[in-house]
Image (cartoon, rainbow, N blue to C red):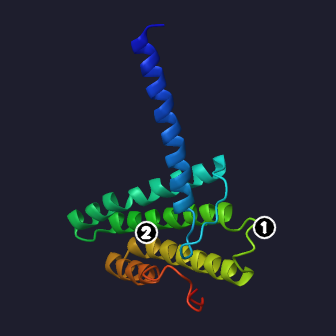
Amino acid sequence: MTRTKTAAYSATGAAASLRDEHCEHTIREEAHPIGTELYAEVATSRLLWFNFAHLFSVSLIPFATEWIAESRLANAPVALYAAVFVLVNVTYLALCWEAVDRPAHEDVSQRMRRLLRMRSFVTIGVFLAAGLIALKWPVVAMTLICLCLITYLRPDVPGRDAA
C-alpha cells in the first residue's frame, strides 16, 4: 500500500472517529428535553434513529412554512403544516421514551414524566384537529396551531421547581 493510500485511510479512520464522538456528543445534548441535565448515558442505535427521525421532522417545518406563505393560508398547506407538527411531536415522544423514560433515570420524577407525556399527547391531538379543521377553515386551524405552539415557549412543564 502506498504512503498516500495509508494517509487517506488514516484520515478516513480519524474522521469516522471524530464523527462518532460528535454523534454521541450531539445525542447527549439533544436528548435532554428538560433543563440542562443529561439523560442519555449511552447512544444506542434506537436513540440515534429516534434522534435522526426527530431532526428530519423538524427540518420539514421551513418547507411547510414557505408553502403556507406562498399560498396565503390555503387549505392543503395549513393541513400539511399541522401534519408536520404531529410528526415532530410523535418523534419527540419516541426520543423522550428512549432517553428519559428508561427505568435507570430516577432523577426524572414519575410526575414530571407524566406531565411531559400528557403535554405531548394533548398537542398531538390539537395538531390533528387543526389538520382536519384546515380542510374547511385554514385561518382557524392556523390560529389553533399558533396557540398550541405557544405552550412550547417554555420548554419545562409548568410547576417544575427551578434547580
Disc sitting over residue 82 in the figure: 2
The structure residue drawn at horizontal position 43% and vertical position 8%, both measured from the top left corner, is 2
Q: How far from the left and from the top, in percent, is residue 123? A: 53, 77
Considering every residue shown, the one lying at the far right of the view is 103
Q: Nearer the viewer, residue 116 or 21?
A: 21
Q: Is residue 7 left or right of residue 34?
A: left
Count residues near mark 1 (Cα–Cα under 10 Å), then give few for <14, some for 14-19, many for 20+.
few
User: In what quadrant of the picture does the C terminus appear?
Assistant: bottom right
- Quarter of image, res 79: bottom left
Can the viewer see residue 53 in this picture?
Answer: no
The structure residue drawn at horizontal position 57% and vertical position 63%, both measured from the top left corner, is 31
The structure residue drawn at horizontal position 46% and vertical position 34%, both measured from the top left corner, is 15
- Quarter of image, res 131: bottom left
Q: How far from the left and from the top, in percent, is residue 72? A: 22, 70
Q: Nearer the viewer, residue 146 or 153?
A: 153
Q: Earlier in the sequence, mark 2 or mark 1?
A: 2
Q: Nearer the viewer, mark 2 or mark 1?
A: 1
Q: Nearer the viewer, residue 11 or 77?
A: 11
**How far is mark 2 from mark 1, CA to CA?**
32 Å
Q: Amino acid at mark 2?
A: Ala
Vertically, is 39 above or below 46?
A: below
Count residues near mark 2 (Cα–Cα under 10 Å), then give few for <14, some for 14-19, many for 20+.
many
Identify the residue under disc 1: 103
Q: How far from the left and from the top, in percent, is residue 82? A: 43, 69
